[in-house]
Amino acid sequence: MRIATAHTYDQTITNLQDRQQKLSFTQQQLTSGKRVNYASDDPTAAARAERALSGIARSDANKRTLDASRNVMNIAESALGGATDLLQTARETLVAAGNGSYTDSERKSLAIKLRDIRTQLLSVANRPDGGGGYVFGGQGSSSPPFIDTTTGVTFQGQGGESLASTGERLSLTVDGEQAWLKGKSGNGMFNTAPGVNANTTLANTGTAWISSGAVNTPSELPYPAATSPSPVYSITFHVSAGANTYDVLEDGVPLASGVAYTSTKNIAIPGRGMSVAISGKPADGDSFSVTEAQNNLNIFSSLDRTIAGLETINQSGGVIQQTVNTGMTQIDAAMISLQNARSAVGEQLNRMDGIETRNSDLKLAAQTEKSNAEDLDMVSAISNFQNIQTGYQAALQTYAAVQKLSLFQYING
């Protein structure tokens, strides 16, 4: 078979170009450190790397969202802790206001202190989150969510929480309306309050006041009520010939009648698992009520009523004690409401640690998958490069030798 010289040259050049291309490709892999630099290098591996890259991007986005939520929850936890401290100071101030030897001016100075605490609490409730929003803004608010009006503090916004759009439940706000304006009133199960005098249909005229009460037998408790409206209990006093007795009624129906009254002694609501203590000297016809607790405790309105009571002059000792006792009961209930909110925030912060760990694991898995799909085995690649380089050099030397075997080279020689 005859082989033309031109054909030999062409075959040799094609071989050299192929080897040079492989050498360049391997050199590019070594330079980049990646086995797959273009999708055409290995379409399957490139697709795996792209999916892994998307997973890494999602993990990074989730991490940014987690950091934003953690920042808000840390601010909320600190704010609720500060608010609890302020309420504790308010309670101590009320304890001092109950001193029977205090004058009206001294109680007024304590009311001024309470008003300053109220102002600080409002500032805490409107705490910004550092990102243009408000920690207690509910489902989002671009302006302070709590507004101080002539009728009291109101919530200007939508109740609930603003959640991040991730697979995990991450809050970007706290339900401020629930925490500050919808706490459980009274002692958490029922409310106690002065009623009206049955003889005059006006306010009580005696010097007695009622405690917040206690639950003695939970199984007998009528609250929460199975029907609406819930039952209302009243304790009505009768004074005759120096004897002081009381009746206990449920929606006007007597449960106990003519029971001798002793100041500060617990008065049981028969068969209902509740008891209250009434102190002082009630007048004939005076009454006190017991009603179901509601989720309507407004911390600011409670302080407003207490402040107004302390600023009123020429009040009897019984009215002052009732103002103080009611104020302390409401502050205690408000503290429980804020502590519950703080516990919920703390639980979220604890849960975020687990979310961060899972997110980091997912990112690491995606990074490993991406590395497995496109990264280069350097030892194998260097060995391959050296083999290709040796073959290329051999091909060059062979081509140089073949060039000297032409007829023209023979004739010239």
Image: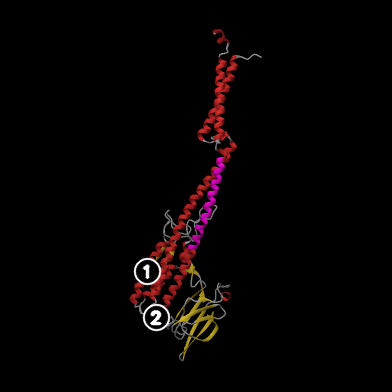
Give the overall secondary structure of the magenta segment: helix
Q: Is residue 356 visible?
A: yes
Q: Is residue 49 visible?
A: no
Give the vertical position of 176 relative to 378 (above or below). Answer: below
Give the x, y percent position of residue 310: 38, 75
Q: Amino acid at mark 2?
A: Gly
- Residue pictured at 48% horizontal, 50% vertical: 64
**Sequence-wise first label, 1 or 2:** 1
Give the x, y percent position of residue 405: 58, 13
Q: Which mark is residue 115?
A: 1
How many dots with numbers?
Answer: 2
| Local secondary structure at mark 2 | helix
State yes or no: residue 73 in magenta: no
Residue nearer the viewer, 47 or 303: 47
Dot 2: few (<14), some (14–19), or many (≥20) neighbours within 10 Å?
Answer: some
Residue nearer the viewer, 199 or 276: 276
| Span of residues in magenta | 342-371
The C terminus is located in which quarter?
top right
The N terminus is located in which quarter?
top right
- Residue pictured at 44% horizontal, 75% vertical: 326
Dot 1: few (<14), some (14–19), or many (≥20) neighbours within 10 Å?
Answer: some
State yes or no: residue 353 in magenta: yes
Give the x, y percent position of residue 299: 44, 68
Give the vertical position of 382 relative to 105 (above or below). Answer: above
Which residue extends farthest bottom?
A: 241
Residue that mark 2 sits on? 317
Taking the image as shown, residue 140 lies to the left or right of residue 218, namely: left
Image colouring: secondary structure
Q: Amino acid at mark 1?
A: Arg
Mark pair 1, 2: CA separation: 22 Å
Give the vertical position of 91 relative to 130 (above or below). Answer: below
